[in-house]
Image (spheres, grey):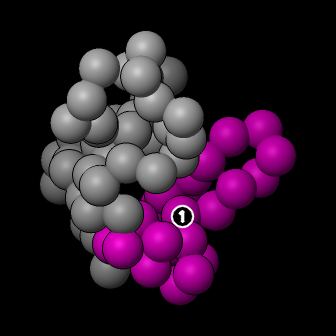
Amino acid sequence: MIKKDFDEKILTKEELIELFENGEIRDTGKGWFLEDQEIEIIALHDVDPKFLQDIANAKNYKILYKKR
């Protein structure tokens, strides 16, 4: 379980998938929510993005709480 004790957090792809599977991150169709606050999920790639074929296949992701 992730606690809201961060402004941003780096997770592995496996950790991010686990948060979705456990229902900790919810996709409402209007955004992703963690602990009832909207978040942004950013893929972190090791290569230049212009060479990427699949942007959802990063090794790590950053979660940011969106400012209200």
Query: In this orientation, does residue 35 appear?
Result: yes
Residue 23 magenta-highlighted: yes
Residue at coordinates 55% horizontally, 41% vertically from top-left?
A: 54
- Horizontal and vertical percent position of residue 41: 45, 41
Instruction: Judge by depth and name the residue closer to the eye, 64 or 58.
Output: 58
Say left or right for 26 vs 50: right
At 54% from the left and 34% from the top, the residue drawn is 53
The residue tagged 1 is 25
Residue at the far top in the pictured view: 50
Q: Position of residue 56 (x, y in %)?
A: 53, 46
User: Is 18 part of what is drawn in magenta?
Assistant: yes
Residue at horizontal 32 percent and vertical 79 percent from the top: 1
In the image: residue 58, left or right of residue 30 = left
Q: Mark 1 falls on what kind of element?
A: strand
Which amino acid type is marked by label 1? Ile
Place of residue 51 in the rendered image (x, y in percent of width and height, measured from the top left):
41, 22
In which quadrant of the rendered view does residue 13 lie? bottom left
